[in-house]
Image (tube, grey):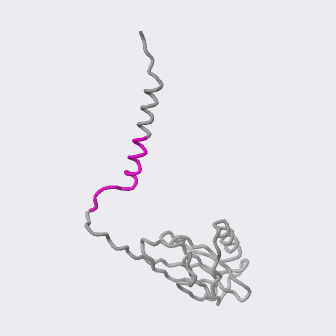
Amino acid sequence: MHTKPSFKHSRRFYLLTLLLLILVVPLYLSGCGSSSSSSPSSPSSSTVTLSGQVSGGTSPIPSVSVYLYVAGDTNPTNNTTTDSNGNYSFSYTYTSSSNPILYVVAVLPTGHLISIAGSASNMPVAVNIDELSTVQTAYAINQAGESINSGG
């Protein structure tokens, strides 16, 4: 007589396999294992340079103040003034454990322009500040339910 494998045995096999995956995969992904150091290492610090151009329409805007903010902070961490071509540049030092999100605000006589720079460890080549970046940043922050510090 030929017996078919019962569904109960197949189901048990799949459940055990699933349980094993649930238990083992997170341990593997978390990098569990022994550390060669007996004491925790202190976070290292890194410095990033953030630069870009402030423009209105297609024209660069010279001699305006640009402020660098860490998301969640109310005070700027750095500031500078654009050159005659609307370019700005400044540095920011952070610890590897913090890796904050940065944004920049240009203060014009007629209002403010803003742009999200991104995480400190993954800065783009340039962060340009204009009307489009302002709309994009305001939309993104609104979707997250946050508010914008206008700087200055």
Asked which quadrant contains residue 39, the reply is bottom left
Asked which quadrant contains residue 58, the reply is bottom right
Q: Magenta region, mostly helix, strand or loop?
A: helix
Left or right placement of residue 62 versus residue 31 in this view: right
- Residue in the picture at 68% in, 77% down: 130
Residue 77 drawn at (x, y percent): 53, 84
Residue 74 drawn at (x, y percent): 58, 82
Which quadrant is home to the C terminus? bottom right
Outermost residue toward the front in this view: 8
Does the magenta run of residues contain 44? no
Does the magenta run of residues contain 28? yes
Left or right placement of residue 120 versus residue 111 in this view: left
Asked which quadrant contains residue 124, the reply is bottom right
Left or right placement of residue 11 versus residue 31 in this view: right
- Tell which of 37 and 106 is nearer to you: 37
- Tell which of 122 and 44 is nearer to you: 44
- Residue in the picture at 28% in, 58% down: 34
Residue 144 drawn at (x, y percent): 63, 66
Stretch of the chain drawn in magenta: 19-35
- Tell which of 89 and 30 is nearer to you: 30
Count the labels in the image: 0
Query: On screen, 118 above or below 88?
Result: above
